[in-house]
Each structure stands twice: as structure tokens, then as C-alpha cells.
């Protein structure tokens, strides 16, 4: 294998590594992790750098996340080992006489990969990718729901989320917030209500939810999704 093929392989590996990290980030996002936190933890797991933050505790909070974290670490170990072995093999097969010409020719595949990576960072392209992910997630998970929930942040074991009510759940229709049982029975605090075309206002005891309201809520993520019959949304609207 000459150095041209080696650099072509290197370029493909860079692209492959990005695809793999995005795939595992998506899987963690399906479990309810915010995008930035999911991506950071996936990179940490794949590279085996052992970077620990308070956010890493979120990976241990559920059984499905622990299993996914183990799979990510094992996949990263095997993938990294394969890369190192391939490049050691390439190094010992190089011929010094062909080195200069091959280095120049290797600029092409590296340039292609850099262009692709730069292209996918364009905001419009990223927005299109987020919409595609949301659409795919909606088909895979919660096929029959219309409402959406966007996870904004974690605070301890609870979350701050924004729920968009395209359809008010039957048990909440026409019911004032004080009689809904959201706080007393579900431990869900509704902080803000933003009606369609209006501005966000603090929720009051007599607040009644309407279709297309946007609610800023605090509580258990699974409970929020269940009570409002909402599926995950991956980008801010």
C-alpha cells in the first residue's frame, strides 16, 4: 500500500469517525440526553480519554444508557485498534523513493474530507439534518403522538423542557392548572405558557392549556413525555 492509499484511508477514517460519533450521539439523544451533552460524552467514550464531568453521571442514570455506553466504549476500542494496526502496516510498506509524489497526491482525499466536514457545519445543512433526525425519530419512537418535547437542560435528576401542545391531552382539556394534578400528582411544575402569536407568561392557577401553546416545564423527563403525550424534538423551534 502506497502513501496515497494510506492518506485516502485516513480521510475515510476521519469521515467514518464523524459518522460513528453522530450515530451514537443520536442513539443517546433517543434516550433523552440533550444534543451537546450527548455528543461530548460519545466523543469521550469513543476515544477512551476518560474525561469525567458531572454530566457523565447522566449516562449511569438508566439501564439503557449504561448498556449503550458499554457498547460505545467497546466499539471505540475496536475501531481505534483497527486504525493503529492499519497505519503501522502502511508505514512498514512505504518506499522512500515514492514518498514525495505520494504526499502531494494525498492532498486530494484530505481536501475532499475537509470540504465535507466544513459543508456539514453550515447552519442550513445542520438544520436540515436536525429536521431529518426528528422525522426519523418520530417514525421510530412514538408514532401516534403529535405533541413534542424539547429537552433544554438537566438539573439534578429532573429536567427543564419545552412542550409544544398541538393537541391538548383529553384529561387536561378545559381544566385549570390548579386542578390538573400536574404538580401534586406528577411532580411537574409548569413555569411558563406561550400561546400562539403571544409572549411567554408565568403560569397561574387558572391557566387552561390551548392547542399550540408552548409550555416551559420542570420535572421528570419520562413523566413529562407521558403526561403530555409528547415525542422528542431535537432542535429548538
Image: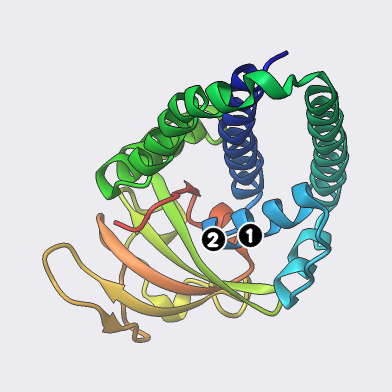
Say left or right for 224 vs 222: left
Q: Is residue 59 left or right of residue 13?
A: right
**Which image quadrant is residue 8 in?**
top right
In the image, 41 versus 17, the foreground residue is 17
| Residue bearing mark 2 | 36
Question: What residue sits 37% from the left and 47% below the top?
Answer: 121
Q: Nearer the viewer, residue 190 or 74?
A: 74
Residue 31's label in the rendered image is none
**Which residue is found at the position 35% from the left and 57% from the top?**
164
Circle 2 — which element? helix
What residue is shown at x 69% (from left), y 51% (from top)? 42
The chosen color scheme is: rainbow
Query: Residue 45: x, y in percent?
Result: 78, 52
Q: Nearer the viewer, residue 56 or 114?
A: 114
Picture quarter with the C terminus? bottom left
Q: Could you give the CA–CA distance between mark 2 and mark 1, rounded to whole angstroms?
A: 6 Å
Q: Are marks 2 and 1 in contact (CB under 8 Å)?
A: yes
> Residue 179: x percent and y percent?
46, 76
Q: Quadrant of residue 75?
A: top right
Q: Which residue is mark 1?
A: 40
Residue 135 lies in quadrant:
top left
Other-residue count near label 1 (Cα within 10 Å), few / some / many at <14 / 14–19 / ≥20 = some
Dot 1: what SS? helix
Amino acid at each position: 500500500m502506497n502513501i496515497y492509499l494510506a492518506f485516502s484511508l485516513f480521510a475515510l477514517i476521519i469521515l467514518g469517525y464523524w459518522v460513528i460519533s453522530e450515530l451514537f450521539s443520536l442513539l443517546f439523544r433517543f434516550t433523552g440526553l440533550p444534543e451537546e451533552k450527548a455528543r461530548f460524552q460519545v466523543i469521550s467514550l469513543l476515544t477512551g480519554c476518560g474525561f469525567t464531568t458531572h454530566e457523565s453521571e447522566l449516562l449511569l442514570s438508566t439501564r439503557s444508557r449504561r448498556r449503550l455506553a458499554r457498547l460505545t466504549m467497546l466499539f471505540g476500542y475496536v475501531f481505534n485498534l483497527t486504525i493503529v494496526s492499519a497505519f503501522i502496516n502502511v508505514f512498514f510498506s512505504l518506499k522512500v523513493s515514492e514518498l514525495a509524489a505520494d504526499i502531494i497526491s494525498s492532498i486530494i482525499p484530505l481536501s475532499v474530507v475537509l470540504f465535507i466536514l466544513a459543508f456539514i457545519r453550515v447552519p442550513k445543512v445542520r438544520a436540515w439534518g436536525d429536521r431529518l433526525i426528528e422525522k426519523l425519530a418520530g417514525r421510530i419512537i412514538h408514532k401516534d403522538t403529535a405533541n413534542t418535547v424539547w429537552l433544554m437542560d438537566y438539573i439534578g435528576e429532573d429536567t427543564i423542557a419545552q412542550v409544544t401542545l398541538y393537541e391538548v391531552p383529553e384529561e387536561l382539556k378545559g381544566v385549570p392548572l390548579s386542578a390538573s394534578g400536574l404538580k401534586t400528582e406528577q411532580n411537574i411544575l409548569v413555569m411558563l405558557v406561550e400561546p400562539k402569536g403571544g409572549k411567554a407568561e408565568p403560569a397561574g392557577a387558572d391557566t387552561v392549556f390551548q392547542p399550540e401553546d408552548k409550555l416551559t416545564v420542570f420535572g421528570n423527563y419520562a413523566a413529562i413525555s407521558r403526561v403530555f403525550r409528547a415525542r422528542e424534538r431535537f432542535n429548538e423551534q
